[in-house]
């Protein structure tokens, strides 16, 4: 019996797309925040990269 989990890639892609849409549509985010990239990294992660200010470093969430 395996203890590792694998990602449901279609669901993960929908999740990343929903986060991107929310990022662009949200009035809660501070001015100057930027979406950098988002994607699925099998077998078990969705990755979101963003900047918290223009020209700032890329930050990320897994």
Image (cartoon, helix red, strand yellow):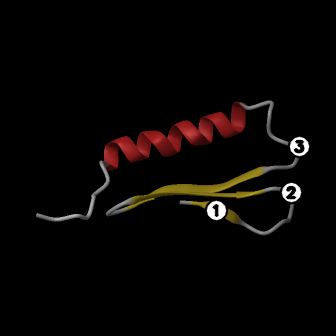
Q: Quick one: SS at disc 3?
A: loop
Q: Which residue is mark 1?
A: 60
* Up/down of 32 relative to 42, above or below: above
User: Is disc 2 placed on a helix, strand or loop?
Assistant: loop
Disc 2/disc 3 C-alpha distance (Å): 8 Å
Q: Quadrant of the N terminus?
A: bottom left
Q: Marks 3 and 1, Cα distance to the nearest angstrom?
A: 18 Å
- Disc 2 target residue: 53
Residue placed under numbered mark 3 in the picture? 31
> CA separation, marks 2 and 1?
14 Å
- Is 35 rendered above or below residue 20? below
Instruction: Identify the residue at horizontal 26%, vertical 64% (top origin).
Output: 4
> What percent of the width, then of the height, locates residue 46?
47, 55
The residue at 53%/36% (across/down) is 18
Q: Residue at x 86, y 65 (%)?
A: 55
**Drawn side of residue 10 relative to residue 41, left or right:** left
Q: Judging from the image, what secondary structure is the residue with disc 1 in?
A: strand
In the picture provided, is 35 more to the left or to the right than 46?
Answer: right
Residue 16 in percent (x, y) is at: 50, 45
Disc number at residue 28?
A: none
Label 2 neighbour load within 10 Å: few <14, some 14-19, many 20+ = few
Sequence-wise, the earlier of marks 2 and 1 is: 2
Discs 2, 1 touching: Cβ within 8 Å: no
């Amino acid at each position: 019996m395996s203890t590792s989990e694998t990602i449901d890639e279609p669901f993960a892609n929908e999740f990343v797309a929903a986060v991107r849409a929310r990022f662009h549509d949200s009035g809660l985010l501070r001015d100057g925040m930027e979406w950098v990239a988002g994607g699925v990294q099998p077998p078990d992660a969705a990755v979101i990269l963003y900047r918290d200010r223009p020209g700032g470093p890329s930050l990320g969430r897994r």
